[in-house]
Image (tube, rainbow, N blue to C red):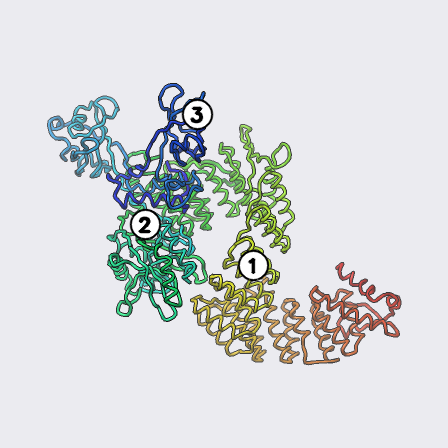
Amino acid sequence: GNLGGGSSYEEAEDVADRIFRKYEKDGDDEDGDGEDVDSDKSNYEAMLYKPLGITLIEVPKCGVYVQAVTEGSARDAGVKRGDRIVATSSTVGGQMWEKNTLEGVLAAVQSGTMLGKSMRFRFERDEVLSSIVGFNNSDEDMSRVDLQRAISSVETARVRVKDTATETFELTLPIPGRDMRKLLNGDIFNGDMPYGLHLVQFPDDKQGSRVEVFEVMEGGTAAQSGLLRKGDRVIATQSSIGDMMWSKRTIEGISTAVRTRMGPSVRLKFERTVDLGSWEDDSHDFLESGPEDMAGYFATGGAAVGVASRSRAAGGDSVTGAGLNTSTLATSLSILPANSKRNWAAIQDVRKFHDRQARLWPPHLSLLKPFVRAEAFLDASQALHDALQEVQPFSIKMRLETFEFHSRCIMVWLVPEEESLPQIESLQKMCRDVFPQCGRRPEFMNFVPHLTLGQFETVKEANTLMGLVQERFEGFTIDVNHLYLLSRPDKGSQSVQQVRVLLGRKRKSLDQVFKEYADLRRTGADLTNTTTSSVLLERCCFDVMAMGRNKDVEGIQTLVREMQAGCVEMDQKFLNLLMLALVKSDRSDLAVDYFQEMTAITNQEDGGWVFTGEHPPTSDSEGEAKSDSGRSMTPSSFIRPVQPNVQCFTTMMKALGRTGRVEHAFTLLDYMVGNAHAPNIRTINTLLEASVRNRELSRAQRLFATLKGEFGEGFEQFLSPESEEGVRIAIKPSEVSFNIMVNGYARQKKPDKAFKMLMEMRKAGCRPDRITYTTLVKACVTAGQMARAENLIEDMREMEIPPDRFCYNLILGGLAKQLRWKEAFDVLNAMEDHDKVQPDLFSYSYLVSACVRAKKIKAAERAMAMMNDAGIMPNVRVYSTLMAGYGSAGKFFEAQKLMADMQQRRIKPNEYTFSSLTEAFINAGMMDEAVAVLDKMSKAGWSEDPVVKTLGLRVLVGRGDFEGAFETLEAIKEMAASKTRRGMSALVVPYNAIVEGAVGAGRRDVGVRALRAMMGDGVPPNRKTNLLLAQEKGLSGAERVEWLLEVIRVMREHRFTPMGPLYTEIIDAALRADDAETAALQVKDRAAYLYSVSRLDGEEAGRLEERVINIMKLDVNGSWFDDTVRTGRVGSTASQGTFSDEWDSEPNDWRNSFMGAEGRR
């Protein structure tokens, strides 16, 4: 059946895949049956004796392999890693016995080497596998490649590159009851009736001869079945008596068998070569890779040529023909040196030091730039397919050359040799004919194919580099097998999107292969575990994973529909990958539907699961089933339900968890155990993850508690639910189990419990890994315990677990939230200097954010400069963050310069960027410029939200139009009312803007009006509101005291408590006006909780209170003055009296007595 292993972009698989392509490229597959891909396997025998010096490993379904070779007879005999033991000699005699298990090999070795005897081994060597796992490879040492993964990848590649398969089927023909003379004497297979079957005999080098169907005549009995076609081969006929089948290779033999058949009918066995099409190395979806990520451009990209285009036609995203008629400099059609790791490395070793584009684009030779926009890539790739059908892969010989771009820019290029130039120019012209609007116009600039290595200021520098690398690029060639459509989705992004087009291969779409499969099924052929089934399912597995990575749900559904229409029976591997792809595409509901549909295991109303023995019944009048997600299902497409394995059940539990159906996931575990499916630790971890994800930490804790087992202490085993037979499964927890629980406590902001889990993890004998520590760092950062998080970095170093970039970014993000910008710089430096971890875009983004939040604009500019020096281009978010800093500081000139820099780098500003620029103009008092930016935002089609409206309100306030500001405020209130309660609380910002403008303009009446309206709308004044009202500087003396008392009175009338800024300001103003009584009353009000003083104002409040106490101690009467009407102390019952007892104590003791009460509150 399907070979195991990953259909992913692992390096071993890519290497194997490329190696197998030589059979198609070089024509080594002589008979076209795809079988010659196994020709790299060969057997040899070796006599071995003690010590053998080999390490063995058993690979399920594959055999026993040599994992390593050390000192011993095996090394002397030339045994290599990756060789498979086929057979061993018997203990007595020279007979060889096949061995497929490790147990069998060990038993044979033990008995065969007794008394120092030697024994004979038969090994199988796969040259392809050997080249991957580290031997017969002169380029580099790849011995660290995992052997089991490499074996799986090689066998998977072998399946994929098969383009034909041979399948057999039988057909019953009736023997006519009349005109027996013709049957006995005539040529019964010349096309005449009654059979109407014309057979032709051909010579065959391997079997002497073969008989093929040349024509099937209408009206004949052979045509009635509709199953035979031209090219089918007759290989056997039924015996005269009985049901035995006899091989036949001649027409005479077939005719004789039919004539002598004793019975009403005769069965003929046919052989058919199924054209499976080529394994496509194109990509019909977007693949993302870093500009320096070599493996990303080696990877294969999908087999479903027809499926991709049909998925768009069926409702997926598509681009009209007009989309192919535009162009942009942000994309290109290019050739990449992606067929040789050595070539790629040679180019990149130079580019990373001398080419300023090295961290933005992969090494490439542009054919067309500008090219079509990225959203038209899929249609463009199809257009290139159609136009380049006859273009075969070719190679380009390259040489070094310099080019003077201008006086201070000398380019070093790799350019084609003269002999290669016509091919590349011809290819470029064909591409330009498809997209005439793309590329440089020939009448203005000739096409000069080149691959840039670097830029230099002087010719001398350029020539120096050429001299240093001349030998490296001697005889340098680039294989052109693909064209790459390249785009960077965001100019600040570190990833490159690619769509690839394969040159020169005849393609057969996957839906045609499905039709071939369906036709064979109609013949009654059993295709289970056949080459056709294996190849088809392997290609479908690859495609469904590729679509899942790109979240192409429509493509996945289209592929499944095509498989259903072709009656392709899904297997466990495909079902599992299908569900994983849908989970990755955020459509776990569809994954749940497909599991129930394909396995006939359905969820009941009581939450339990049951196998119905048939596909889900239909629920509508037309007999079409509807899933829980509303998707139509076609149960008739499947003959037999898929019997899920533990991986399928586990993925189903993951999907249930993602849809919030945690209870159903746990009941599925009961069903699984009750039907003799043993869960593994991955199953349990999936349930733990589902519980944590859905914030059901208590459920996760109960499940995790069972991991302790029933006997003894410590984490020993998980005991599954008991089956009907009274059997339970014991499972040992893994590091992942603990990491999930640590993450659960981190999400709940419970770092202490997370650290306790770390101790339990060590008790269980599980070693904490990077994920463990990173999750603990996350727990500390979430709880605001930054010192504890930084200490974890030291612990990781002691444990020899190097902190990675993600771990550092968590700390930088936490420091940014706490405005600790200096420490953020220290962490970034330690990141590079101590742990040799290169900061990325997020690292610098957090650093800039920390500086901006702390209002340290110069430091933010320094962080941005460091980012540019590191070769990392800021994205729109980083630019907008710095722009916000300029905006809050009113630095309009710097903001404009930053906007110009964004435009130069072709980074499109967003609403946040423009809002920050507007704020810069407003804070600088440049209202006309602010209005111009707001108008530009409106013309760009950005909808006016409360933030943009607030900016407009601030402009009106800045112009002194307070009535217009209040009108705009009403519009903002309407917008906020349609949102959540949080939206209403955000109204404090526009209210504060009016208060700030009114107080600044000396319009205290407007300020009080805004304050009353604010509290009337239920919007609580925040600390900034109090600070703005307290900062009214146009008054002094008693007038200032009266103003502050009025503000306090208004707040208390609306049942709001004045905050620290008003408290400290009223005391200070009263003391400056020689009004100690008013100051003393405020101190007493605070003791009665009529003020709310935070830590930010606590120190200043304490200093002023001490002054008041000292002044009152000098008062002759030592009295407090009651003035409830004047200060608006609502509900106060204080009356005039003496405090002689208090004056006898120390002032600080007196203050601490009521400050203690404040603290207890």
Which quadrant of the figure has residue 351?
bottom left
Verify CB contact (< 8 Å) between mark 2 and mark 3: no
Residue under label 1: 829
What residue appears at the point 51 percent right and 72 percent down from the top-left corner?
Answer: 895
The quadrant of the image that shows the C terminus is: bottom right
Q: Counting other residues with Cα less than 10 Å from the Cα at mark 3, is it few (<14), some (14-19), or many (20 or more)?
A: many
Q: Position of residue 542 (x, y in %)?
A: 38, 45
* 617 or 464, nearer to the observer: 464
- The span from disc 1 to disc 2 (Cα, nearest Å) is 49 Å
Q: Counting other residues with Cα less than 10 Å from the Cα at mark 1, is it few (<14), some (14-19), or many (20 or more)?
A: some
Q: Counting other residues with Cα less than 10 Å from the Cα at mark 2, is it few (<14), some (14-19), or many (20 or more)?
A: some
Query: The residue tagged with tag 3: helix, strand or loop?
Result: helix
Residue under label 2: 305
Tell which circle, 1 or 2, labels the residue nearer the N-terminal end: 2
Tell which circle, 1 or 3, labels the residue nearer the N-terminal end: 3
> Can residue 615 be seen by looking at this rendering?
no
Relative to 795, residue 256 above or below: above
Q: Position of residue 386 (x, y in %)?
A: 27, 54
> Can residue 129 be seen by looking at this rendering?
yes
Q: Amino acid at mark 3?
A: Val
Residue at the farthest top position: 92
Verify CB contact (< 8 Å) between mark 1 and mark 2: no
The circle on residue 109 is 3
